[in-house]
Structure formats: C-alpha cells, structure tokens
Image (cartoon, helix red, strand yellow):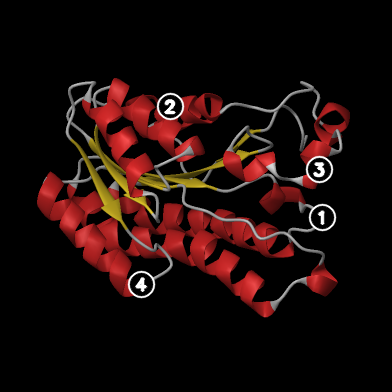
C-alpha cells in the first residue's frame, strides 16, 4: 500500500508511534524513526521494521528544539533521499490541577506536543512538496476536543495541533499535500497506564466500548490517511476513542 514511500514518525520508539512505524513498514514504506531518549527501544523497533524488507533508520532528537529538529530533518532527507509521509506523534503529559501546575510543566508540554509538531512540518515541508502527494498526519487527542481534568497544558497543546493542522491543510493543498489529525482517546500505552482516571474505573463509565483502545487501532487509521485512499481528505480530525467524545 505504501511501497516505495518514505515516512518520518516522531515518538516512534514506543506506544502509538511504534505501532504506526511497524504498520507502515509492513505495508512497504521505508521508515525514519525519531525518538527522544531510549536508544535501545528505538533500535529494537528499527530492527523489527527492517525485518519487513524496508529501509529503517533511527534518529535521536528533542523535537521541541527548533535547530536540533532542522539538523535531524536535513539528515533524514540526506539518508532517505525523499520523504512523502510525516507523522507527528511525539508527545508528553505532565498532569496537575490548574492551581498546582507549574510554569515549567505547562511550557514543556506545549513545547514538545505543539512546537515539536510545528518544527517537523516546517523543516520537512520543502521535501514533502517535491513528492507527488505528500501526507502529514498529526496526533492530537480527544483532550484537545473537549478538555480533560488535570490536563490544562496537554489539552491546550492538542487543541493547538488541531488548529495548526487545519491551517497547514489550507496552505499546502495547492502543493497536493494533505494534513489530517488523529485524535485518540484512552489508548493502552505507557503514557496512559499511570492516569488516575484509568485507575479509578473511568474507562468503564465513560467509554461506550468499555475498554481502552490499542496502538494498532490508531495505526490502522494512520495507514489509511497515508494511503491514496485518503487523497481527497484534508483538514479532518478522526477520533479513535471508542465513542468517548461523541
């Protein structure tokens, strides 16, 4: 489905990013894995992706750093020759009640989740424009649609990702680039395992499916949006939340 294409996936060493990376590789895409700290985990994902017979390379990067992101993006283009798919998945959460949230916790979540998305779109857009039909897929959250207690910073960042994506979709459509958003709900990952809402049985109460989603269920939507089947879809937000936010 993605044979001959190259995808850049941020936050690719675990969770949703890992699932998207392996799904793309399984469907023929060369993959550039961007990770923050865990080189061992990234190398494990890289080897799993490479086993599908595609080119897979890993790059360490603080996506919130504009210059570092540019350097890594330039290296990816040099190594992979071209990029036609960008998935901005890297994200962090630092949850506190608003009255107890520090400026540092607010800024760090905004920098990684929102500015990091901007950085990679900014630096890879010229390369995406050279492809016949570039695809940008940004990971937001249902928290960016409806707000979530203890997540003022995260909700603000993810809402910003949605607004940014709609603007990018309008600006780059003339270059045949689509830009869409996936808004997951409660997905079973390391990030959600420590949420108090999960521990207190909120899932069973609030989610119609009465369960958490899987990273693979998000990855299947990312595969669709990266494929030619989604060539006339842009500026859209697709929720993968088991009905949580409907």
Residue 58, horizontal then vertical, whole percent: 26, 46
| Mark 3 or 1, closer to the camera | 3
Q: Counting residues from the N terminus, which is met first, the one under dot 3 or under dot 2?
A: 3
Q: Residues within 10 Å of mark 3 (few under 14, many from 20)?
A: some
Q: Residues within 10 Å of mark 4 (few under 14, many from 20)?
A: some
Q: CA gap, disc 1 to disc 2? A: 31 Å
Q: Counting residues from the N terminus, which is met first, the one under dot 4 or under dot 2?
A: 4
Q: CA gap, disc 3 to disc 4? A: 34 Å
| Residue lying farthest to the bottom in this orientation | 103
Q: Counting residues from the N terminus, which is met first, the one under dot 1 or under dot 2?
A: 1
Residues 191 and 219: in front is 191
According to the image, label 3 marks what residue? 197
Q: Could you tell whether 161 is left or right of 148 in the image?
A: left
Evaluate if marks 3 and 1 touch, with contact meaning CB atoms under 8 Å apart.
Answer: yes
According to the image, label 2 marks what residue? 224
Q: Residues within 10 Å of mark 2 (few under 14, many from 20)?
A: few
- Report which quarter residue 213 is drawn in: top right
| Mark 1 or 2, closer to the camera | 1
Residue 40, horizontal then vertical, whole percent: 34, 43
* Residue 137 visible within the image: yes
Residue 149: mark in rendering: 1
Residues 219 and 62: in front is 62
Q: CA gap, disc 3 to disc 1? A: 9 Å
Q: CA gap, disc 4 to disc 1? A: 30 Å
Q: Could you tell whether 222 is left or right of 202 in the image?
A: left
| Mark 4 or 2, closer to the camera | 4
Q: State the quadrant of the N terminus.
A: top left
Residue 66: mark in rendering: 4
Residue at screen point 35% across, 55% down: 172
Q: Residues within 10 Å of mark 1 (few under 14, many from 20)?
A: few
């Amino acid at each position: 489905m993605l044979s001959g294409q190259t995808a850049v996936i941020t936050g690719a060493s675990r969770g949703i990013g890992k699932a998207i990376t392996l799904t793309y590789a399984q469907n023929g895409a060369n993959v550039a894995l961007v990770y923050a700290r865990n080189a061992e985990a990234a190398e494990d994902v890289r080897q799993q992706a490479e086993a599908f017979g595609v080119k897979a390379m890993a790059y360490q990067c603080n996506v919130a750093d504009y210059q570092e992101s540019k350097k890594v993006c330039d290296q990816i283009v040099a190594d992979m020759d071209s990029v036609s798919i960008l998935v901005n998945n890297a994200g962090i959460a630092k949850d506190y009640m608003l009255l107890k949230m520090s400026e540092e916790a607010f800024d760090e979540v905004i920098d990684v989740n929102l500015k990091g998305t901007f950085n990679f779109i900014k630096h890879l857009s010229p390369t995406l424009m050279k492809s016949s039909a570039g695809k940008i897929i940004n990971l937001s959250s249902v928290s960016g649609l409806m707000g979530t207690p203890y997540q003022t910073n995260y909700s603000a960042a993810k809402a910003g990702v949605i607004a940014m994506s709609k603007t990018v979709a309008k600006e780059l459509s003339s270059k045949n680039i689509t830009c869409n958003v996936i808004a997951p709900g409660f997905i079973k990952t390391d990030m959600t395992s420590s949420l108090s809402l999960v521990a207190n049985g909120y899932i069973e109460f609030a989610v119609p499916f009465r369960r958490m989603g899987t990273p693979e269920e998000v990855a299947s939507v990312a595969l669709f949006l990266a494929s030619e089947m989604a060539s006339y879809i842009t500026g859209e937000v697709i929720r993968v939340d088991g009905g949580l936010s409907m």
